Every structure is written in structure tokens, then in C-alpha cells.
Image: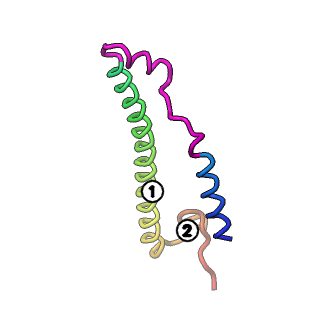
Amino acid sequence: MLRRMVLAAVLLLSVAGPLAQSAQACPMCKIANEQDSLLPTAYMYSILFMMGMMFSIGGGIGFGMYLLGRKENAAIESWEQGASDAEPGADGLLPGGLQPATT
């Protein structure tokens, strides 16, 4: 099976390789690069800005999830420490709405 896959990949690359064309820039980038102006630099900065915003938003969401997880873990630990000495309240329930174990 592996031999067939390797043979198919080699065959595909040998046939498709010579047919591949070189990549060309978009028409606006090509025109801007042909002129001697500051426009190519502006394109570069706009691309960097767009990439930076994408990673900034993703990083902000990730950092928010991290803080949310830390807050949840702290709440769970404080509840576990308080649950060991917890006494049933007036309604007969422990904190968090749990019922005490009966024997």
C-alpha cells in the first residue's frame, strides 16, 4: 500500500511539475512595484498591520480564556476547602445546593 502511494506521488509530481506556472503578484501590487514610489512600502505596512491584528485578537481571546480558567480553579479550590467544614444551612443544603450525606 505504501509503495503504491509513493509511486502515485512520484508520478503526479513528474507530470504536474513541468506544467506548473510561476506565481504572479496581483495586478495592483505589480503596478505599484513597477512605479518608483512609496506605495509598495505602504502595501507592506498594511499587510503587517492586518497580520498583527489577527494575532492580537487571537492572543487577547487566549489570554481571556487563561484568566477565566485560573479564576475557575481558584473558585473550585476555595469551595473544596470550605466544603470539608461546611455545615448544612437553614434549608438543610450545603453551599452550592448539595445535600449532606446521610447514614
Please tell me whether residue 15 is drawn above or below residue 32 in the rendered image: below
> Within the image, what quadrant is residue 33 found in?
top left
The image quadrant of residue 74 is bottom left
Magenta region, residue range: 17-39
Q: Position of residue 15 (x, y in %)?
A: 63, 48
Q: Nearer the viewer, residue 64 or 80?
A: 64
In the displayed structure, 26 sits above or below 96; it is above
Query: Residue at position x 50%, y 72% from top?
Result: 87
Q: Position of residue 14 (x, y in %)?
A: 59, 51
What x and y, as percent, mark residue 94? 55, 68
Question: What residue sits 37% from the left and 29% below the top?
Answer: 49
Q: How crowded is the residue under tag 2: few (<14 C-alpha within 10 Å), some, or many (20+)?
A: some
Q: CA distance from mark 2 to mark 1?
A: 24 Å
- The C terminus - image quarter: bottom right
Quarter of the image for the N terminus: give it.
bottom right
The reply to whether dot 2 and dot 1 touch (C-beta < 8 Å) is no
Secondary structure beneath label 2: loop
Q: Please provide percent x and percent y for residue 67.
A: 40, 52
Residue bearing the label numbered 2: 94
Residue at image location 64% in from the left, 70% down from the top: 2
Residue under pointer 1: 69
Q: Does residue 20 show up magenta in the picture?
A: yes
Local packing at callout 1 (Cα closer than 10 Å; few below 14, some 14-19, many 20+) is: few
**Left or right of 57 in this view: 42:** left
Determine whether 39 is above or below 92 in the image: above
Does residue 87 appear left or right of residue 50 in this picture?
Answer: right
The amino acid beneath tag 1 is: Gly
Type of the residue with mark 2? Leu
